[in-house]
Amino acid sequence: MASPDSDPGPIEALYIKFLSADTGWINPLYIRLLGGLVVGGLLVSIPLFYAGIESVDQLSSLQLCLILLVMQVCILLAAKLGDRFVDAIAKTLDNLSL
């Protein structure tokens, strides 16, 4: 091990940066991106379940492009707005009374 006065080597620096539990290596932006992906998937899946679509083969390429567009917009909005976007979507889905 390196002495406390010297700089850590490249492997020790990698360990400290990525593997140490106390460094907080999970960026909140990644959590927001995953949250946007989940919200976008939920928003896309609700109409698909009501339409009775059982496989991707039943969708046209235009519908697939629109699905990807909706999911990307949700990811970007969640990354930019964070909890405010997720709360707004949750309130909207709550008011729909599905």
Image (cartoon, rainbow, N blue to C red):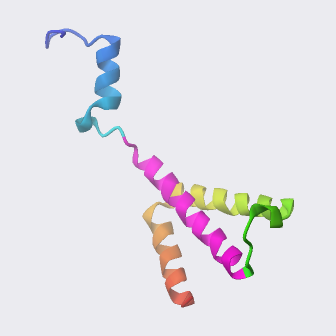
Camera-nearest residue between 6 and 55: 55
Residue plotted at (20% across, 8% down):
6
Residue 82 screen position, x and y as percent: 46, 60
Camera-nearest residue between 36 and 54: 54
Residue 47 screen position, x and y as percent: 69, 77
Residue 35 screen position, x and y as percent: 49, 59
Which residue occupies the extreme left position in the image?
Answer: 4
Left or right: where 71 falls relative to 29:
right
Which residue occupies the extreme bottom position in the image?
Answer: 97
Instruction: Say if 77 sits above or below 86 in the image.
Output: above
Quadrant, the C terminus:
bottom right
Left or right: where 82 falls relative to 77:
left
Residue plotted at (60% across, 64% down):
40
Residue 93 screen position, x and y as percent: 54, 81
Range covered by the magenta-colored residues: 26-50
Residue plotted at (62% across, 71% down):
43
Which residue occupies the extreme front position in the image?
Answer: 54
